[in-house]
Amino acid sequence: MPKRYTDEERKRIQGEICSRLTRGESLTSICESDGIPHLQTVYDWIDEDNDFGRDYDLARIRSADTFIDKILDLPKKHNGNAGMLRAELESLKWVASKLNPRKYGERLEISNANQFVPLDKLVEIAHKSKNFSTLPDRDFKQADVLRLLDTPE
């Protein structure tokens, strides 16, 4: 039978989990620590407790910053081993981009003569047009974007 936690114990544990996630620890390793409940219990708490779910999500997003900080420390850690440095750099960048894609994900931009149209703007245009067949099947050019902006809703 799973251990029952008081509200005070549960809040303390939830705070510790979020703090450790923010520092870049995995939830799996946190749950293997003494005094921390099983992984499934933590997932249940996330589902049942909106405040903890929000704090958990925020901790995951913030952990991306931790991974970026680790990238800055890599040259000292690998001391000239370019292969190890490159491999860990790519891994940390990938993790950060998945944890916080808005901040660290790849930015897709369509360009024409140094005039950029961000991908989110193109999606907005597609939704405004409500007719995805009006989207050109070739590279976007600024004229295409302007034409789509003028498409009636």
Image (tube, rainbow, N blue to C red):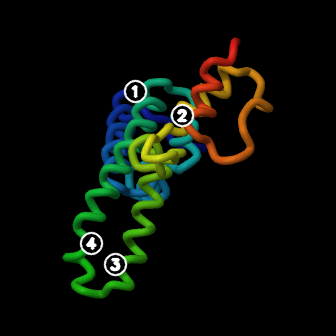
Determine the CA span between mark 4 and mark 2: 33 Å
Taking depth in this image into account, of 75 and 21 the one nearest to the observer is 75
Query: Which amino acid lies under the numbered mark 4 shown in the image of this protein?
Result: Leu
Q: Which residue is mark 2?
A: 120
Q: What residue is disc 4 on?
A: 74
The three-letter code of the residue at mark 2 reads Asp
Q: Quadrant of the N terminus?
A: top right
Of circles 1 and 2, the one toward us is 2
Q: CA distance from mark 3 to mark 1?
A: 44 Å
First in residue order: circle 3 vs circle 1 = 1
CB atoms of marks 4 and 1 within 8 Å: no
Q: Nearer the viewer, residue 68 or 147?
A: 147
Instruction: Tell me the quarter of the picture where residue 77 sits.
Output: bottom left
Q: Is residue 73 above or below residue 77?
A: above
Contact? badges 3 and 2 (CB < 8 Å): no
Identify residue for label 1. Answer: 7
The nearer-to-camera label among 4 and 1 is: 4
Task: Say which element carries label 3.
Answer: helix
Judge from the rendering whether residue 78 lies leftward or rightward of residue 109; answer left or right.
left
Mark 3 and mark 4 residues within 8 Å of each other at the beta carbon: yes
**Helix, strand or loop at mark 1:** helix
In this rendering, is residue 1 above or below 70?
A: above
- Residue extending farthest to the left is 76
User: Quadrant of the rendered structure where residue 148 is?
Assistant: top right
